[in-house]
Amino acid sequence: MKKFVSKGIYKDGKILENYGFTVENGVFKDILPNSEISQGIDTISLDGFVYPAFIESHAHIGELANMLQYINGEMFDDSTLLQAVEEAKHMPVFIFNVDFNKISTDTFKTLFKMNKDIFIQSKDEHSTFVSKKLLDKNHISSDGLDKGSITLKDGEFIGIFKDNAIKRVNGLKKVALDKNTLNKVEDYFLSRGIVSVTNFDYYTEEFLRKSDLRIRIVQGIAVDYLNDAIKAHIKTGDIVSDSFIWGPVKVFLDGSLGSQTCAMKDERPFKGLLLLSEKEFTEIVKEANENELNIAVHAIGSKAVNIALKAFKTCEHLSQLNRIEHLQFINEEDLTLLRETPFIPSMQPIHATSDETLYKTYMDNFRYAYAWNTVYNEKGVIIFGSDVPVEDASPLKGIYSATHRDYLTEEQVPLDVAIGAYTEFGGKYNYSRKQGKIEKGYLSDFTVLKNPLKEDNLLNNAVILTAKGGEIVWKK
């Protein structure tokens, strides 16, 4: 048995000062005042405030690995992007996390014609640029693609593929996930107080499943592999190991706001791209749910959200644990459907912060946007993540975004709800073992913060250490 004492622990929405706990077989045993814990040389003193380890409910580990290994274009504009390509010594030039809305079509046209192998992925992962040289080398063209899924400049294709069209060039991307990179990925999450991660990059599953992990993985299944999963008798929630659990089947209904491809109801303020019809999506949900596989559907635009809700309502007798990922724009007339449809809302609060300019540019004051408070009040639950590497995975930044907004301030949530969306709710609704609470019988995954979380210290607080199953796996 292990013994820990601390300045305080977060339990049931409040800080119990000068409390500690014991751990046995990887779970919390007793939660006690420090004075009631027999202290000796084997007692570990945690110099900070203990919170349940945070739960990241929507991540892309393969893409994060690429960002950590290759060129991170997060801060690039036209000139710095061109400079990075010019100075790159390794071919092909791989650049990830670029905000395509900050790059002019003239710059992309220049890059397209450049005599270099170039692959650039957008921040929202819904657009990919490939230079003409790299396309020609691999005998790939834009022929036959819908004009809404590519970008033209003066009637000429300039190398940008969107949403479903990206499949044509995904084979050109090198995945940099190996033991060394996995260590960097784990440090990335653990340094932010995160132990459990729902990963939607299916191509990394075999490597993660067979690795000795310091984090816990809930592994999403790409819809293209639904039949394979059914044949293998895989079910959502199946425990493969202490660190690996099978998650939901990931399906895309539309694109993103950044690429202006999220599908909007009545084409207001724009049409976007709908990737599946209501009938097609409902059939996928039915097949998956009948085989005890839950669905996690990417639905950002109001039309996509409407279709997701109707399909989940149709299949409510099969499962009430399907998820809508993002759920960014909801039509007012769908609020009743939102309330009555069983599903798990999985949202990313930091999107509202980074998307503020896009929202003001494209969304024409759309009322139910990033509507966390409305969703929470209607559903009684909400789980949070970051869509990393689209956004920084820091739960402290996410909690800040959820509790502080410069627009639609009525959609802020209380601090305890935001913390719960990264802890207790995330644990309860991520198909995994008991986690997300400091309570007897729960997994002893915890993080230690310098100060108790308050609305005015979220961005200047600090993670001191993170533990998995009572073992300290990262320390500042």
Image (spheres, rainbow, N blue to C red):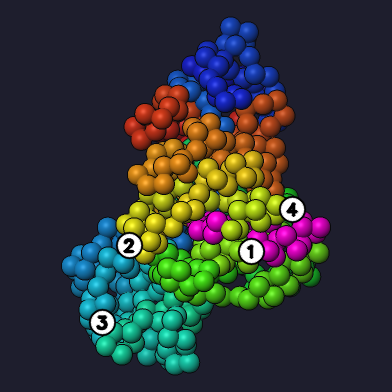
Whether residue 334 is visible, yes or no, is yes
Please name the residue shown 68% across and 64% down the image: 310
Binning the other alpha carbons within 10 Å of mark 3 as few (below 14), some (14 to 19) or many (20 upward) gives some
Label for residue 349? none
Query: Start and end of the magenta stretch?
Result: 308-332
SS at badge 4: loop
Disc 2 crowd, CA 10 A, few/some/many (<14, 14-19, 20+): few
Residue at numbered disc 4: 320
User: In the visual, does 376 lie left or right of 190?
Assistant: right
Compute the Cα span from label 4 to label 1.
13 Å
Distance of label 2 from label 4 (alpha carbons)? 36 Å
Q: Identify the residue under disc 3.
A: 109
Callouts 2 and 4 close, C-beta under 8 Å: no
| Gap in angstroms between the C-alphas marked 4 and 3 | 47 Å
Residue 42, placed above or below residue 271 = above
Locate residue 112 relative to residue 28 in the image: left or right: left
Quadrant of the image containing the C terminus: top left
First in residue order: circle 2 vs circle 3: 3
Which tag, 1 or 2, sits closer to the chain's start?
1
Q: Which quadrant would residue 90 be assigned to in this image?
A: bottom left
Amino acid residing under circle 2: Thr
Going from the N terminus, do you reach mark 4 or mark 1 first? 1
Residue picked out by circle 1: 308
| Between discs 2 and 4, the one toward the N terminus | 4
The residue under label 2 is 361
Label 4–label 1 contact, CB within 8 A: no
> What residue is shown at x 40% (from left), y 62% (from top)?
363
